[in-house]
Amino acid sequence: MLEEFGAVIARGGAGVVISSQSGRRLPALTADEDRALATTPADELLGLPLVSRVTDTLHAYQLSKRGNGLRVMAEAIRWAERGARVNAISPGIVVTPLARDELTGPRGAGYRRMLELAPAGRAGTPDEIAAVGALLLGPDGTWISGSDILIDGGVTASWYYGPLRPEES
């Protein structure tokens, strides 16, 4: 989709890809793996060794969301040639019907714990995500391009440096 829109976007246009905080919790990739996720043609992504090693759905989700941010970064260069911008937003848990299902599903206890131990202490709202989208698409965001904005109430910060930090083995 990024490649197709990037080929037709008008001068002054802007796009936003919705990703996820989950991509930020994936362990660091090598520089070569980052570049491959960012630049491999979409129809060749499944052939990457990094992708073919995926064995569970959470890892697949995290890798796809990491890829979203990296692809936005790479595509921002191409979009700029047309005078346009593209960015990503990586929200955490936002109060939606899907989030309600997740909070009561098999991983629900973990999601509820994330919200309780995040600095904000709550889920986000669709309006909060929309406000970031409006900034990125509007005239106040014209200097922002190729960025992935994390908006998760501090869950990722807590994951790395706070009470959500996984025990090191």
Image (cartoon, rainbow, N blue to C red):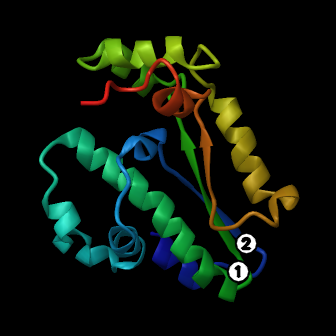
- Residue 66: which quarter of the image? bottom left
Q: Amino acid at mark 2?
A: Gly
Q: Amino acid at mark 1?
A: Ala
Screen quadrant of the N terminus: bottom left
Label 2 near label 1: C-beta < 8 Å? yes
| Residue furthest to the right | 140
Q: Position of residue 8 (x, y in %)?
A: 59, 82
- The crowd level at tag 1 (other Cα within 10 Å; few <14, some 14-19, many 20+) is some
| Residue furthest to the bottom | 81
Q: Does residue 68 appear to the left or right of 73 in the view shown?
A: left
- The crowd level at tag 2 (other Cα within 10 Å; few <14, some 14-19, many 20+) is some
- Residue 113: which quarter of the image? top left
The residue sitting at 53% across, 66% down in the picture is 72
> SS at mark 2?
loop
Q: Position of residue 11 (x, y in %)?
A: 75, 81
Q: Nearer the viewer, residue 75 or 167?
A: 167
> SS at mark 1?
loop
- For disc 1, the marked residue is 10
The residue sitting at 64% across, 78% down in the picture is 9
Q: Does residue 86 appear to the left or right of 95 in the view shown?
A: right
- For disc 2, the marked residue is 13
Q: Position of residue 150 (x, y in %)?
A: 60, 43
119 vs 85: above or below: above
Marks counted in the figure total: 2
Please tell me the numbered disc located at residue 27.
none
Screen quadrant of the C terminus: top left
Q: Does residue 128 appear to the left or right of 72 in the view shown?
A: right
The residue sitting at 52% across, 23% down in the picture is 162
Q: Position of residue 17 (x, y in %)?
A: 54, 56
| Residue furthest to the front | 169
